[in-house]
Image: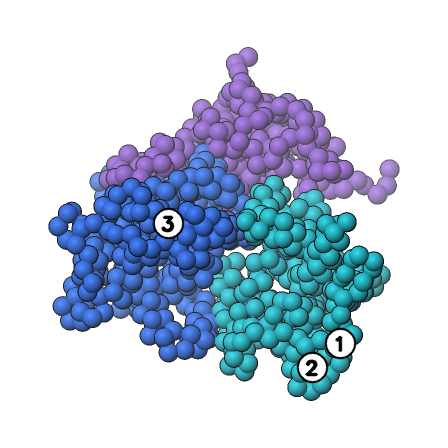
Chain colours: A cyan, B purple, C blue
Amino acid sequence: MKLTATALALMVDGVAYAMILFLMSVGLTITLGVMRIANLAHCGFAMIGGYLGFMLVSKAGFGVILALIVSAAGTMVLGAALERTVYRWVYTTGELGQILMTIGLAFVMIASVNLVYGNDMHALPLPSSLTENMNFGAVSISAYRIFIIVVSTVIAGVLWAILEYTDYGARLRAAVDNPRMARCVGIDVPRMFSATFAGGCGLAGAAGFLGSPFLPLEPFYALEYLVPILMVVAVGGLGSLKGSFLAALLLGVVDTLGRYYVPALGAFVIYLAVCALLLWRPQGVFARGGA
Amino acid sequence: MSVPALEIDHVSKSFGALRVAREVCLTLAPGARHALIGPNGAGKTTLVNLVTGLLQPSGGAIRLDGTDITDLPPERRVALGLARTFQISSLFPELTVAENVALAFEAKLGHDRQIVGRLRDRTDIIDGTAALLDSLGLLALAPRPVTDLPYGQRRLVEIALVLALAPKTLLLDEPAAGLASSDRNAVLDLLLRLPSALTILVIEHDMSLVFRLADRITVMVEGEVLVEGAPAEIRANPAVRDVYLGKRSHG
Amino acid sequence: MTTDAQASRIVRDAFSRHPLSWIDALPWVAVAGLYFAAGTYLPLGTQVMIAIIFALALDLALGFGGIATLGHAAFFGLGAYAAGLYALDISTEPISGLVAAGLVGGIGGLIAGPLVLRTRGLTLVMLTLAVATLLHELANSFKSVTGGADGLFGYKIAPVFGIFSFDLAGRTAYWYGAAVMAVVFFLCKALVNSPFGLAVRGIRENQVRMRMLGVPVISRLVMLYAISGALAAVAGGLSAQVTKLVGLDSLTFTLSGNVLVMLILGGTGSLYGAFLGATLFVVLSDRAAAVDPFNWLFAVGIVLILAVRYAPQGLVGLIEQLAARAGWGRGRA
C-alpha cells in the first residue's frame, strides 16, 4: 500500500514537471515548426519570467495568480522587443548560425540576470495555502503540484481552444503545416509569427514562474533546462502542440520515476530513450506523418 | 531486339491518396534520343526521381540494361551507368568548376575514399577534368566558384559533370529551362554532339529543342502516358494539342 | 588552343589549395617564442595547444564535412578517460596512451556515426547533444570505473621516450603537446589535400548530388566522423596526461559549446581558424574568467551574436578579405 502511495505521489510529481516542460516548450515548438528557427535562448525567457514573478511576489507582495499574469505579460513584451531586433538577424543565417546566435543571446541573459540577482538560487516563497500536502487517505500529495497541474491544464485547454476554434488558430495551423502555401493564400506569416513568438515567450515565462518552487532560479537556468525542452520538442515533432504535450508527459514521468526507482542510472535512461526515439522517428515520434 | 537501355515497367507511385504516377511504361533502346513532354504537374520529374532512386515506386519495376534496379539505392544505380541533371542545376556551390567536375571523375574512378596521397598528384582525375572542360569550351571557367557563375553557365557545368561519369543512360530534366536563347543554343549544340551510343531521356517544354533532338516522344498527363510516337505523329496528334491548349470550349 | 599540359595545369591551379607555406611555420614560431620569452605561461600554452588539437578535429567534421555537432566533447571525454584508465591500469607510457585514446575515439565514431549521421539539420544536432549527455550521465553513474564526480587522478605518466620526464614547470608537457599538435596538424593537412578531402567538401555542399555521382554519402561521413573523433580523443588524452586529472567536465555541453565557439570565431574550413580561435578563446577565458566569469560569459555572448552576423567566416575570413583586397590568392575550403 505504501508503494502505491509513493508511486502515485511520484506520478503527480512527474506530471507536474511534465506540465512545466510542456508550457516551456510550446513557444519553441511553434518557432521551430513555423519559421524553422532554432531558438536556443528560449529557456532564457522562462528564466526571466521566473525572476520577474519572484521579484513581484517577494518584493512587491503580489499574489501568486497576479504575479503569474504580470510576469507572463512582461516576458511577452521582452520577447516581442527582442524579436524585432536581435531575431531579425537570426532569421537571415543558416541553422548553425541560428544555434550560435541564440546561444550567445542565452549567455547574455545569464550574465544579465546574474548582474541583478547574483548567482544564488532563488525559490518562490509560496503562500501557506499551497505549501501543505493534500491528503487522500494514505496518499499525501503536494498541493502545489496539484495547483500546477490544474493551472497548466487550463492554459493548455485555452491554447487548444484557440487553435481549434478561432480564425487565428486556423491560420496558425496552416502556417505550421505549410508556411509557403499559407503565404500564398494570403496569411501574413511573418506578422503572425511575431505575435506567436511573443506569446510563446510569455508562456515560457509563466512556466518559469510556476515551476520555480521546485525548479529553482539561478543564472544558468537558461541552459539547464534547454536540453530537456529540446528533447520534448524533438520527440513531439516540430510544430505539434499535441505532440509536445504527449512528449512532455512521457519524458517528465519517465525522468521522475527513473530517478527514483533506478537512481544508479539516473538521467541516463532518459537520454537513451530520446536517442532511440529520435533514431526511430527523426521527424518526431508524435508528429503527423509527412511534411 | 537487343536489351533495352532503360525499361520503365508499369511503374506507379502514390503519396497516400494522391496518385502521381499510374502504370507508366516507357522503353528506351540503346542510343535512343527520347523526349518526355507534358504539362506542369504531369509527373515527369517524379518519374525521373523514381528511375534514379530518390523515390520508391508503389508498384512496377525499373530495369537498366536488363538489370532490375527497382530496389537499389541511387548510388548503386549511378554505379551501373545512370546519370541525371536536375531542373535546378545541382552542383557544389562553393567549389570551383574544376573541383566540381573533378569530383565526378573522382567518384567514377572510385578515388573518393582515398585519404592517402594528394589530389594534386592524381593525374588521371586532373587530365580527365582538363580534357573534358576543354572539349566543352569551359576551361576558362575552371577556377571560378560555381556560385559566381550565371545560370546558363551553371547548366553547362552540370552537363560536364554528368558526362564525366561516362554514363550509359542520361536523364536530363529541363536542360533549357530559364535560359536565354543563346544559352539554349549552346545547350542544344552540346546535346546534339553527345556520343551516339549514349541513351538520352530528356524532359523539356521547349518544343524546338525537342523536335531537333528527339527521335521518339512520350506525352504524359496527370501521371499517365497519353501517347508515344515519332515526332511527326505527336505533332499531328489532336489529343496532344488539346492537352497543351486546353479542351476547346465548343464541340 | 591550349595544350594538354597547359589545360591540366589550369585545372590543378583551380583546386583549393592547402599547401605548406610560411604561414604554417607561424604557430611553431609562436610556440618557441613563448618558451623562451615567457616561461611562466607554459601551462597556459599547453592548454592552448590541447584546445587547438580539439578545434582542428572539430574543423574536419564541421568545417569540411558540414557535420553540425553540439556533442564533440563526447570524443574528448572518451579520450581523456581512456588515457587516464590506460595510465592507471595498463601502462604509464604516454605515447601508447595517446594511441589508445585515439583508438577509443575512432571506435566511438564508427559506432555512433552510422546511427547519428543518417539524420540532418536540427535532428542531427539534437542527437549529438543527446549522445554526449548520455556519455556524461554514464560517466557519472559508473563511479567504480570513472571515479564519478571526483574523476580519475593520482596516476603517473612515464617519461616521453623514456628520457623526458614530466617536470613541475611544465616544460616537457609543453614540448610534448607541441609535438602532438604538429602531428595532428600534418595529418589534418594530408587529409584535406587528399581526394577524400574533396569528397567530404562535396558532401558538405550537396549531399544529393554526391549520391547522384555514385558516392555512398553516409559511409564517407562516418569515416570522417571517426577520424575527427579519434583526433578529438587524442586532445582529451593529451589533457589527461598533462594535467594528470580527468573529470566529468571533459564531457559537458559547456566543453562542446566552447570548442564550437573557438572554431566559429577563428573560422571553419581552413584549419588555421582552429589555431586563431582556440588561442584567442583560451587566453581570454583564462584572463577574463579569473576576474569575473559572468562578465566573460556576457562578452562571449555578444561576440557570438556579432560574429555570426558580421563575420560568419570568422577571423580567418576577415583576414582573407583583407588579403584579397591587397591582391593575394585564395586557398581554403
Report whether residue B105 is seen. Answer: no
B179 shown above or below C171: above
Which chain is disc 2 placed on? A
Looking at the rendered structure, which numbered label has been put on residue A57? 2
Residue B196 screen position, x and y as percent? 45, 26
Residue occupying image coordinates x 47% and y 55%: C70
Q: Quadrant of the C terminus of chain B?
A: top right
Could you tell me residue B166's position as x and y percent? 41, 30
Q: CA distance from mark 2 to mark 1?
A: 14 Å
Chain for disc number 1: A
Residue type at mark 3?
Tyr
Compare marks 2 and 1 and give the one earlier in the sequence.
Answer: 2
Q: Which residue, as the protein is rendered here, is positioned at the far top?
A: B1
- What residue sits right under mark 3 in the picture? C81
Q: Is residue C49 above or below residue B201?
A: below
| C5 w.r.t. A197: above or below | above
Q: Residue at x 39, y 60 (%)?
A: C259
Asked whether the beta carbons under mark 3 and mark 2 sit within 8 Å of each other, the answer is no
Nearest the eye: B2 or C232? C232
Q: Which quadrant of the figure has residue A232?
A: bottom right
Judge left or right: residue C269 versus residue B124.
Answer: right
> Which secondary structure lies at badge 3?
helix
Determine which residue is flagged by label 1.
A128
